[in-house]
Amino acid sequence: MTAHPAAGLAEGPAGTAGDGYTPSPRRLARERYKRARTRRSAAAAGLSTAVTAVVLYLLITGSPGWQRTRETFFNARYARIALPDVLQGLLLNLELLAVCGSCVLVLGLLLAVARTLRGPVFFPLRALATAYTDFFRGLPLIICLLLIVFGVPALRLQGVTTDPVVLGGSALVLTYSSYVAEVFRAGIESVHPSQRAAARSLGLSGAQTLRYVVLPQAVRRVVPPLLNDLVSLQKDTGLVSIAGAVDAVYAAQIIAGRDFNYTPYVVAGLVFVALTIPMTRFTDWVTARLDRRRTQGGTV
């Protein structure tokens, strides 16, 4: 009695998927070549990185003023002294990021919607939104901060706060909302007009079309640039120190002015870098994910 042909397929050789498939020698050789090329590339990258690091180290440490620079900017004792105060001041920067970031997103979206409203009756609103974005995009942030922080208290208006944190945060919101508004507007205008026409043909009003059809697509498309703006906002929260708010930067400034050593500034800078890198990597991950979905034809 002869065995059934399928019996041989069930007992495939080791390393097969169990369905009787055996990779051809050419495919195995190609996979071995790819693995070897990956190993060679990793080794070359590691070697070149190590050589570059050694050259930079020797170049910096061998410079005539390195000893003085190390004592002034990279003193471990002053770094240990400054770190607790810098971290305590960093809490203010994080609070500003959370509050100002939320306000920037809301105000920027409102400005973008105002600039994309259609019809002659909305012309004054479009003009005001355009003037706002043009003015604050052109005005340097540092000048906006100085004008708000020192100009508003000088007016002596009844009931208007003079808190430097509130005034500095307001300047950040005014400036960054103009940039975010343009990002949102680009996303809104990137939605094809056929989407609006299809929504209106289904009986949706103009406001409903904007709310349920246009904005969801626009927001998904501009998530990466919005995250980049939030990363920039996170760094620029340190500028409120010019108003006297004790954040991470001003805490470093106090210690540096007291001890005549600039290591606290380096500590504050490294703290901001450590805080920014995760957001940057998250932005890259979101961008790559959206690109893959577009390439595969998924929902954007």
Image (cartoon, grey):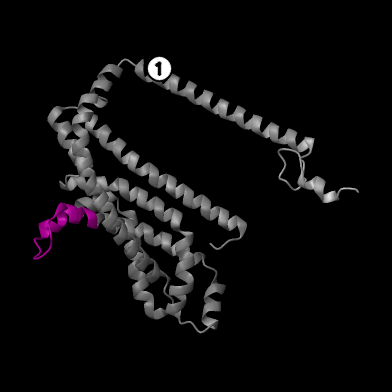
Residue 161 rendering spot, x and y as whole percentages: 13, 60
> What segment is highlighted magenta in the picture?
149-170
Amino acid, disc 1: Leu
Point out the residue furthest to the front here.
1
CA neighbours of label 1 inside 10 A, class few (<14), some (14 to 19), many (20+) = few
Whether residue 276 is visible? yes
Q: Residue at x 24, y 25 (%)?
A: 76
Residue 112 rendering spot, x and y as whole percentages: 39, 66
Q: Examine the structure image and report whether residue 163 is included in the region drawn in magenta.
A: yes
Q: Residue at x 51, y 84 (%)?
A: 203
Q: Nearer the viewer, residue 124 or 262?
A: 262
Q: Is residue 231 placed above or below 267 in the rendered structure? A: below
Q: Is residue 112 placed above or below 85 in the rendered structure? A: below
Q: Is residue 235 left or right of residue 201?
A: left
Q: Residue at x 12, y 31 (%)?
A: 258
Q: Examine the structure image and report whether residue 151 is included in the region drawn in magenta.
A: yes
Residue 120 rendering spot, x and y as whole percentages: 41, 79
* Quarter occupied by residue 201: bottom right
Q: Residue at x 44, y 19 (%)?
A: 54
Q: Is residue 151 placed above or below 244 in the rendered structure? A: below
Q: How many marks?
A: 1
Point out the residue furthest to the right here.
1
Residue 247 rendering spot, x and y as whole percentages: 20, 44
Whether residue 262 is visible? no
Q: Which residue is mark 1?
A: 58
